[in-house]
Image (cartoon, grey):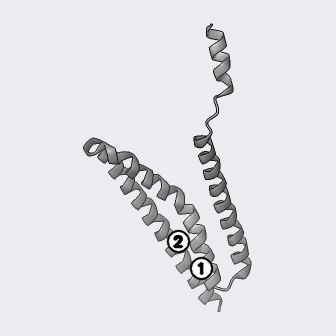
Amino acid sequence: MDTNRNARLEQTELFLGHFLRWGVLTSAAILITGLLAGFLAPEWSASVTRAGIVLLIALPIARVAVTLVIFFIQRDYIYVGITAFVLAVLLLSLTLGRAAHADQINNPQPHADADLNYSQSM
């Protein structure tokens, strides 16, 4: 039984390793494509580069989600709970960060230093 568990653990680690490796390689390929597009089609460069960065940021979140599914399949419910909590915290921080960014874009506030610099130049 212990040998079977070790084999499953090794298989899981190999899968996650391949998942992350291919994700990083895909992200790098997209980033390089975006940089090269800057020379050939500048209007597409920012969008393609942004997609590579988003993929790179999404990889750790996807890894936690995949790990959650693996623990559920293995019926390791303690780790399912822990991983679900970690995934919830990651998604909540991503959501709150995006909402704060959208709020800054919709309601720009001048920096506090802006008034000091303006008054000092007079």
Which residue is found at the position 62% from the left and 39% from the top?
Answer: 107
Vertical order, 29 against 65 (above or below): above
Number of other residues with Cα within 10 Å of mark 2, as a class: few under 14, some 14 to 19, many 20 or more:
some
Farthest residue in the left direction?
40
The residue lying toward the viewer, choosing from 10 and 54, is: 54
Give coordinates of residue 29: x percent, y percent: 36, 56
Give coordinates of residue 59: x percent, y percent: 52, 62
Helix, strand or loop status at disc 1: helix
Helix, strand or loop status at disc 2: helix
Q: Amino acid at mark 2?
A: Leu
Q: Amino acid at mark 1?
A: Ile
The residue lying toward the viewer, choosing from 58 and 3, is: 58
The residue lying toward the viewer, choosing from 110 and 91, is: 110
Which residue is found at the position 49% from the left and 65% from the top?
Answer: 20
Which residue is found at the position 69% from the left and 77% from the top?
Answer: 80
In the picture of the structure, the residue carrying the numbered disc 1 is: 70
Vertical order, 118 against 108 (above or below): above
Give coordinates of residue 24: x percent, y percent: 45, 60
Q: Disc 2 vs disc 1: Cβ atoms closer than 8 Å?
A: yes
| 37 horizontally vs 75: left or right | left
Q: Quadrant of the N terminus?
A: bottom right
Give coordinates of residue 28: x percent, y percent: 40, 55
Q: How many marks?
A: 2
Vertical order, 121 against 20 (above or below): above
User: Which mark lies nearer to you, 2 or 1?
Assistant: 1
In the picture of the structure, the residue carrying the numbered disc 2 is: 16
Q: Earlier in the sequence, mark 2 or mark 1?
A: 2
